[in-house]
Amino acid sequence: MNTSLKRLLGGLGFVVVGWLAWSFIAAPIVPVVWQAPPNPGLTGVFAINQNLANVETVTMPDLGPEDVACSNDGWLYSGLDDGRIVRFNEQGETALFAQTEGRPLGMIFDQQGALIVADAYQGLLTIGRDGQVETLVDQYEGRRLRFVDDVDIASNGTIYFSDASMGFEFHNNLLDFYEGSMTGRLFAYSPQTQSIELLLDGLFFANGVALGPDDAYVLINETGLGRVQRFWLKGPQAGTADVFIEHLPGTPDNINFDGDQTFWIAMPSLRAGVDAVAHWPLIRRLVSVLPKALQEAAATPVSFVLGVNLEGSVVANLQDSALGYNYITSATPCGDRLWLGSLHMMAAGHLPLPKTTH
């Protein structure tokens, strides 16, 4: 090996070592080792199919209708990437409803006709029919809620909502998965007393929230672990939590109950990417300093929605391997339609309410 080549290789080695050292110091995360649960892949009840191949869409004026809320005024509502909440119908008409100046995610109407919104940056909001935005709660024990994500409302008016992460916000949410510190929480907010109660913490990216029949329990999706936990509100198990369904092959995002027998779970991507480095915190630390586009390379987008019955068994499996309408973050039953939301699409999707195997 000649002297010039040796110098070149030595210089490259120095650069690599320097970059590794800088990356370690500059990393925005302190990753921990965690145990990835079993992953069945797209087999058995999760087998690939084309049940979402014929999704119809309604174009939105901006990117990312993450959730869809049904209203008794004949319109549907969704929040967009630029902070707008729009109302729209199946015929493609859209109109501005409100502007939160944040990132509206999960939303649902309360019994008084106000739209309750989980805004990633602004907290838990209420929006009147005139589009006026008011903050219900944006902190807990003097500390700002960093990532309010999804919401549901009990018959007594109590609002249940998730705070996905204590360490990261919507714009850098991937870092929560690379760190693995599991700081997500489930809260209950009482409009009557204007008080907030912590129900569960230590969740790996607390996401979708849905109340069960008779408000006996509330479900909370743990995106990072591919499972859904159940927190009991009534009965002998009240105040305790158990697992409702686990070992999902995808990353459960929002969850919605049809009021009868089925919970609809949207899964925007498969779990495999981050699971593969669960025991390699150093690799995750190095990846955390890369551009966001490279961090996202670990995710495998899919078109994937599950229907799950009251026993936690899969009764509907909706997919599309062609990814026509993909990265689905919510599936909301409205009348005879199932409406789909997505952070990556510039449209809301819909299809006839699928049959289940109850």
Image: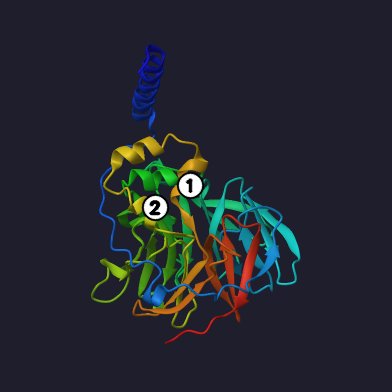
Point out the residue furthest to the front here. 1
342 or 75, nearer to the observer: 342
Give x and y (percent) for residue 276.
Answer: 33, 51
In the drawing, what numbered circle is on residue 230? none
Q: Residue at x 41, y 63 (%)?
A: 250
Task: From the viewer's perspective, tell me whether residue 254 is left or right of residue 114.
Answer: left
Does residue 80 lie above or below 283 as drawn? Answer: below
20 or 230, nearer to the observer: 20
Dividing the picture into quarters, in which one does residue 234 lie?
Answer: bottom left
Give x and y (percent) for residue 151.
Answer: 47, 62
So how many labels did they put on this image? Answer: 2
Does residue 265 lie above or below 274 as drawn? Answer: below
Badge 2 crowding class, 10 Å Cα cut-off, few under 14, some 14 to 19, many 20 or more, is some
Dividing the picture into quarters, in which one does residue 281 lie?
Answer: top left
Q: Residue at x 41, y 38 (%)?
A: 288
Dividing the picture into quarters, in which one does residue 247 lie?
Answer: bottom left
Mark nearer the N terminus (1 vs 2): 2
Give x and y (percent) for residue 336.
Answer: 61, 82
Give x and y (percent) for residue 138.
Answer: 47, 47
Point out the residue furthest to the top here. 3
Q: Which residue is mark 1?
A: 296
Is the residue under label 2 in contact with that under label 1 (CB below 8 Å)?
Answer: no
Q: Which residue is mark 2?
A: 273
The C terminus, quarter of image: bottom left
Q: Secondary structure at mark 1?
A: helix
As measured in the structure, the alpha-carbon distance from the residue carrying label 1 to the one carrying label 2 is 9 Å
